[in-house]
Amino acid sequence: SWTTGNVIEEQVAAIRAQVGDKRAICGLSGGVDSAVAAALVQKAIGSQLTCVYVDHGLMRKNETEQVEKDFVAATGANLKVVDAQERFLDALAGVSDPETKRKIIGREFIRVFEQAQLEILQEEGPEVAFLVQGTLYPDIVESGGGTGTANIKSHHNVGGLPDDIEFELVEPLRQLFKDEVRMVGQELGLPEEIVQRQPFPGPGLGIRIVGEVTKERLDLLREADAIAREELTAAGLDRDIWQCPVVLLADVRSVGVQGDGRTYGHPIVLRPVSSEDAMTADWSRLPYDVLAKISTRITNEVRDVNRVVLDVTSKPPGTIEWE
Ligand code: XMP
């Protein structure tokens, strides 16, 4: 019968058989799947695994710390953190178009990750032969299946490496659905914040700032988002909501009044939705007192924000994200 204990035992044996005495790399995104995949592989091969986390500066408050501290504390994994915040900000400077932002973030991410892989290869030698990925069963069904290999090219000028390095993939979650992955993660002792994390887009807060992405705007949005998350959690609503994007309308200003003075600040949009699979969604009917608390706190605590608005659009016609 299916138990998380059986799944873990089976996968640990399978990973050991596959990797042998070679070494593996796993990219952590901050999300559930990569964290659980890494934790499983860590349990199987311990210090033969090196995890990589690219800090692109587009994460929400405390999420990078959750990976750097809590994930490492829970698993004992070797973690290489690449601080690429400046690089991403530079690449995004002056860009407002959503799809262009996505392309830039995706491109920079791959470059930084490949560079990190090459550095690990240089440090640890050619026995680094495996790449761990948190592929789930639904991912395989959607993409038409097939296990495989991943190529990285050494065109980034690290030097001293063959032209083309091929990694064999380790995909310990290939037979699992999301809820099963969460159960396995919990059994492996991963922090609740990681295991129960709601969906969050790869491009992160970069696509939740309508307008150009800057350090100041990211910091402001991070504060507003943290307040919304805190209050939703405190109200016990995390399980009812699929996700709640918090969006900064950076190119919009409206007039407000605070104390003795007129303000001219930005609106924050709350986009709580309920959904089964993100293909369609409905706006969540949140209790007014929770909305009131979030609104009061954001306008009081976040500099330059003087208005909070609620998105009451279903999907379709609206998407979940604003970009
Ligand atoms: P939309 O906005 O299309 O979002 O209704 C559907 C789901 O996908 C997430 N999303 C993304 N995830 N990269 C991702 O990894 C992206 O570029 C991206 N855009 C949207 C969104 O958060 C929602 O869960």
Image (tube, grey):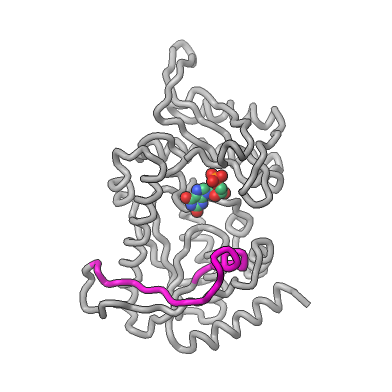
**Rendered location of residue 205, percent (x, y):** 45, 44
Evaluate whether residue 74 shows in this view. no
Q: What residue appears at the point 33 percent right and 78 percent down from the top-left corner?
A: 165
Q: Residue at x 40, y 78 (%)?
A: 167
Q: Is residue 120 left or right of residue 14?
A: left
Say whether residue 192 is visible.
Answer: yes
On whether residue 137 falls in the magenta region, the answer is yes
- The vertical placement of 219 against 133, above or below, is above
Write down the quadrant of residue 179 in the picture: bottom right
Figure check: 116 above or below 22: above
Q: Position of residue 316 (x, y in %)?
A: 61, 39
Say above or below: 105 vs 3: above
Q: Extreme right residue here?
A: 1
Q: Give the camera-side residue of 14 and 263.
A: 14
**Which stretch did the figure color magenta?**
133-156
Q: Position of residue 246 (x, y in %)?
A: 53, 38
Q: Position of residue 302 (x, y in %)?
A: 48, 30
Q: What residue is shown at x 34% (from left), y 67% (from top)?
A: 114
Q: Is residue 150 magenta?
A: yes
255 versus 38 height, above or below? above
Q: Residue at x 53, y 58 (%)?
A: 31
Q: Quadrant of the N terminus?
A: bottom right
Q: Quadrant of residue 209?
A: top left
